[in-house]
Image (cartoon, grey):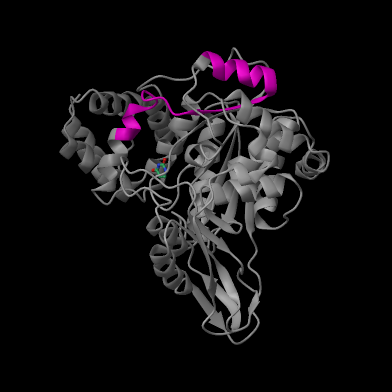
Amino acid sequence: MQMTDLIAKKRDGGVLSTEEIDFMIQGYTRGEIPDYQMSAMCMAILLRGMDDRETLDMTMSMMHSGETLDLSPIQGVKADKHSTGGVGDKTSLVLCPMVAAAGLKIAKMSGRGLGHTGGTIDKLESFPGFTTAISEETFFDNVNRIGIAIMGQTADLVPADKKIYALRDVTGTVPSIPLIVSSIMSKKLASGADVIVLDVKCGDGAFMKTEEDARTLAKGLTRIGRLAGRKCAAVITDMDQPLGWAVGNAVEVKEAIAVLKGEQQGDLLELCLTLGGCMLAEAGYEPGIEAARERMLKTIADGSALRKLAEMVEAQGGDPAAVYDTSILPDAKVKIPVPAAEGGYVKRIHAERVGLVSMHLGGGRATKESDIDLSVGVVLAKKVGDKVEPGESLGTIHASSKEKAEQAAALLRDCFEFSAEPVERPAFIKDIIR
Ligand code: URA
């Protein structure tokens, strides 16, 4: 088999066989196929597409390019969730304890963030002593004992994706649905869960800018998940403004705790109830999303979701007292409000730019090696549809110095657009694909 023939076949609209796809993925992972040939193939796939069988074959071949996690030592149904990434996305911090308190096992692998804020792991490290660098044995033991564990991604999971994604990033081939689906699903399948729920964001702060693209991706992801034998659902959600109020690390943990305490309603809670609803329903633990929502709301009302977070923090070396007393969490030296220069109704909050404000403050990573400041970030005071009087606060900057805070305040003001007319609040949950 020759890679040049496969490139030409796809270029001309052909359908690659299972053997051809495996030859290409394994050969590229082993370094036998050069970058320039794989780049040409990625472009041919972007232009010509792949059918479901090809996408499934590519996903499975990528999944088997490295280690896979066998979750069979964990009893019961295991669930995992993936988000395509948004600004202020602290969903896992609320969803995972809530679903675990409702009785479904959460065995989750998470990553560190590159960009506006940290990833789930960075955020969780706001708990003094907390670590996700736990052994597989501890991971299995914790899930069996308390129903939840979050582990850092192992180096050997889907090496094919690391190589192919790096190539796509510099060859204009990121926005290909079959390439995105195989990239995301190979990693999710390798992580071993029986139930996979996907949060597909759409809008300004998201990877998929339009609802139509987000729906196409969500359908592709769930189809491939099901074809691979897993229970799979996706929720399409708005990312035209940040999720919830806080953007940063410790500030997001504090917000997640407020939701788990029942002190905060709104988009974040709504999203977690919907994703959790899909998880419990797909697992067969509840007949439908409505019944599952009721079950999860009870875990907030009776304090069991918050206790589950404290149990997880303690089981992974962190101080569980910080769940009940958030003053123990990292706190910024300087906090300043950002008064609105004009009045009106908030028409838009550019999510991506708010993320960049957090990054400017030191809350995100520009490169894999950068350190992040867990204490800094932004806490919004207004969301789309809210009325604002001139001089009223749009949000609070949490910074390490007055100078950085003032620079960030000017940047945050530029994230807002106003209308003289009332603005309808956008529908947050756009669709559920089950
Ligand atoms: N996230 C991934 O993991 N892979 C993609 O291709 C796009 C987003």
Give the residue displayed 57% in from the left and 43% down from the top: 329
> In the rendered image, is residue 90 in sight?
no
Q: Is residue 37 magenta?
A: no
Please state the quadrant of the image where ligand 1 appears: top left
Quarter of the image with the C terminus is top right
Which segment did they paint magenta? 137-162
Is 146 magenta? The answer is yes
Q: Nearer the viewer, residue 46 or 87?
A: 87
Who is closer to the viewer here, 36 or 324? 324
x and y, in percent, of residue 47 in the image:
30, 50
Residue 153: name its quadrant: top left
Task: Please state which of residues 152 and 160 is positioned toward the viewer in this rendering.
Answer: 152
Task: Name the residue located 59 percent from the left edge and 87 percent from the top edge.
Answer: 420
Q: Position of residue 174 (x, y in %)?
A: 33, 48
Residue 240 lies, in percent from the top left, at 53, 64
Q: Quadrant of residue 325?
A: top right
When the figure is inspected, residue 234 is found, relative to residue 18, above or below; the finding is below
Q: Residue furthest bottom?
A: 420
421 to 68, vertically: above or below: below
Q: Is residue 288 above or below residue 382?
A: above
Q: Residue at coordinates 41% horizontally, 36% vertically from top-left? A: 182
In-image side of 336 versus 59 (left or right): right
- How many labels were placed on the picture? 0
Does residue 100 show up? yes
Quadrant location, the N terminus: top left
- Say which of 300 and 60 sits in front: 300
Q: Is residue 87 above or below residue 304?
A: below
Q: Residue at x 50, y 28 (%)?
A: 132
Q: Position of residue 296 (x, y in %)?
A: 77, 40
